[in-house]
Amino acid sequence: MKKLMMAAIGGTVAGVVATTQIAGPLLAQETSSQGSVYEQLDLFGDIFERIRAQYVEEVSTEELVTAAINGMLTSLDPHSSYLSAKDFEDMQVQTRGEFGGLGIEVTQEEGFIKVISPMDGTPAAKAGILAGDFITHVNGESVLGLVLDDAVEMMRGPVGSEIIITVVREGVTEPFDVSIIRDTIKLTAVRGRVVGNTVVLRITTFNDQTTSGMKTELQKGIDELGGMDKLDGVVLDLRNNPGGLLNEAISVSDAFLEKGEIVSTRGREAGTGDRYSAQPGDLISGKPIVMLINGGSASASEIVAGALQDHRRAIVVGTKSFGKGSVQTLIPLRGDGAMRLTTARYISPDIVVNQPAPKPPATEEEEAASAAARDRSEASLRGAISNDSMTDEEKRLYEEELARAEEAAKLRDEDYQLAYAVDIIKGLTAIAPEEP
């Protein structure tokens, strides 16, 4: 730990000098010197003292140290950062599934804040924020040049208060403002529903409720269908899931795998790292799985998708994932703070399916034309065969088939990607060999 911290502290000097515009000779000294880590630490100490003594405004020691550590870590990649005691506590609360804010997962790209994904049912999602949006201003103040944690802090505030964020979106020519009312974010990690004979599990985040919630919702769906033998398969919907806890991603993957490596982390030094393998036991006994991903699927979501895809346990449908593909290790530090350090680098779908843009509301003329088209059916044709000769059982089966077809058509209008995934499950079930 000491070696890690010392090496990192030495790397922050150029950043401090560049922002304060003092101690020019010291910068030259660092460039020319090939001295030890201790000499570089002395250099850091000199700059630190000059800032405290000569900067135009008085700056607290804690603020300077925090800024120095953050500068060093954020220079490595957008996801490594220093967490103060308060930030560390906030993160622990967040992984338990309830916290205050807008309900968006963000990262930093090209100096601005990029939305990884809005969380289901949160103020940001209701306001229309999309994965891939860039936030350039918060309440009229630019976020350009701010470290990620400072920009996030600008978006925090009392529950019920208004925030106006300026958004740049691909395909939209001009930036636009979005008003959002802050609220308490209560995440339901997993929601389940039954579509036909398929159980759809919508996983919104990987917190400490995810695996247990997934198992509960899966069992509810199986019970609703009347037992495991009535289940065709499962759709795991990870769209706009920004990730979360690694151990939850591992346990969700393990729930559908009998064996094999789920994920491994390999350190820079030979022989370091961890390997996580599946234990015997598949919750749905090998029945088909389709996973839905998109540009808002990141981190832990990519680990699950990658594990099930690599083992040919699931067909991945949708669009390319976010591509964060990294694991952050929380390393507790003195003073109740922590360091979030990227310690591993980590998906393209098997079938690319784009989600069509929402259709504008239909005009009265279009509604009338649609209603007329629905009225023209086989039964309305002259000379059509009536179903009077059907038995009651045949009528029941016909009506059930008609209801399923109408449900499928409605689902295609509501969520084309999900309808596509359910159709794949149906197709795989139809061609599956019958059990002896």
Image (cartoon, grey):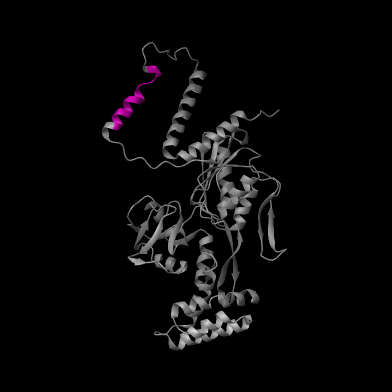
Q: Position of residue 157 (x, y in %)?
A: 39, 66
Q: Is residue 113 left or right of residue 44?
A: left
* Prevalent SS, magenta region: helix
Q: Which residues are magenta?
A: 366-379
Q: Position of residue 267 (x, y in %)?
A: 66, 63
Tell me if residue 331 comes above or below residue 414 in the rendering.
below
Q: Is residue 69 left or right of residue 59?
A: right
> Residue at the bottom extreme?
53
Q: Is residue 280 left or right of residue 53?
A: right
Q: Is residue 184 left or right of residue 219?
A: left
**Which one is nearer the viewer's eye here, 132 or 179?**
132
User: Which quarter of the figure is the N terminus placed in?
Assistant: bottom right
> Residue at the front extreme?
32
Tell me if residue 432 comes above or below residue 311 in the rendering.
above
Residue displayed at 38% across by 53% down? 169
> Residue at the top extreme?
383
Tell me if residue 106 comes above or below residue 294 in the rendering.
below
Quadrant of residue 288 within the rendered picture: top right
Q: Position of residue 206 (x, y in %)?
A: 55, 55
Tell me if residue 412 comes above or below residue 295 in the rendering.
above
Quadrant of residue 314 within the rendered picture: top right
Residue displayed at 66% across by 28% down? 434
Q: Position of residue 327 (x, y in %)?
A: 59, 60
Whether residue 25 appears in this view of the structure is yes
User: Which quarter of the figure is the C terminus placed in?
Assistant: top right
> Residue at the left extreme?
364
Residue displayed at 55% across by 32% down? 426
Residue displayed at 34% across by 67% down? 141
Whether residue 84 appears in this view of the structure is no
**Which one is nearer the viewer's eye here, 120 or 230?**
120
Q: Is residue 186 magenta?
A: no
**Which one is nearer the viewer's eye here, 296 or 101?**
296
